[in-house]
Image (cartoon, helix red, strand yellow):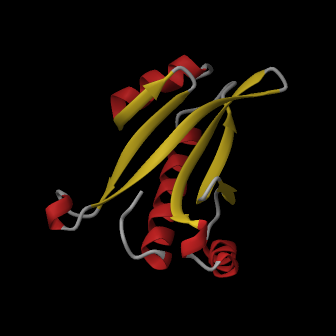
Amino acid sequence: MATWHDLVRFIEQKYDVILRQPDEVRVRIHFGGADVDEGERTQITVIARENVGGEEWAQIATPFARTDDVDLAAVLNEIGGTTIVGGVVIMGDHVVLRHSLPLINLDINEFVEPLELVTGSAELLEELFVGSDDY
């Protein structure tokens, strides 16, 4: 996989796409039970095309809380001790876990594993700090 269009084709085949725009794809990742009524939790994740020095990159970003609803120092402490992929940022009113990958010569596991780690970590952080399943 070496282009944005290759990545988007893969995402459309493997994930629950809820929005597709030229430079962004949003997917819903499912965790837990068979459906929401049985305790399933979901996490919305944005995969966006970025240009870094003329090369295409994919940014994986998933919100897990509103900045006003969490103790940011506690969130950073938790992420520092438990998260191996991604970093936390504030985007607008949201606390977001994100990770970026260069697309040139990208192997599929170099996308899938960080996507799963970022999304799964954000889901756990949302459950720990927010308690609800808002994202």
13 or 130, which is in the foreground? Answer: 130
- Against 129, residue 105 (above or below) is above
Name above or below for residue 85 compared with residue 109: below
Q: Tell me: 121 left or right of 101.
A: left
Furthest-right residue in view?
A: 53
Q: Position of residue 79 (x, y in %)?
A: 64, 72
Report the side of 53 relative to 85 (left or right).
Answer: right
Q: In which image quadrant can residue 102 be found?
A: top right
- Residue ID at (55%, 39%): 111
Taking depth in this image into account, of 114 and 56 the one nearest to the observer is 56
Q: Position of residue 62 (x, y in %)?
A: 53, 52
- Tell me if residue 82 comes above or below residue 53 in the rendering: below
x 57%, y 48%: residue: 61
The residue sitting at 61% across, 19% down in the picture is 3
Q: Which picture quadrant has residue 66?
A: bottom right
Q: How many marks?
A: 0
Image: 61 above or below 73 = above
Residue at screen point 68% across, 79% down: 77
Percent from the top left, x then y, of residue 19? 40, 32
Residue 29 position within the rendered picture, expressed as x and y whole percent measured from the top left: 37, 49
The quarter of the rendered structure image containing the C terminus is: bottom left
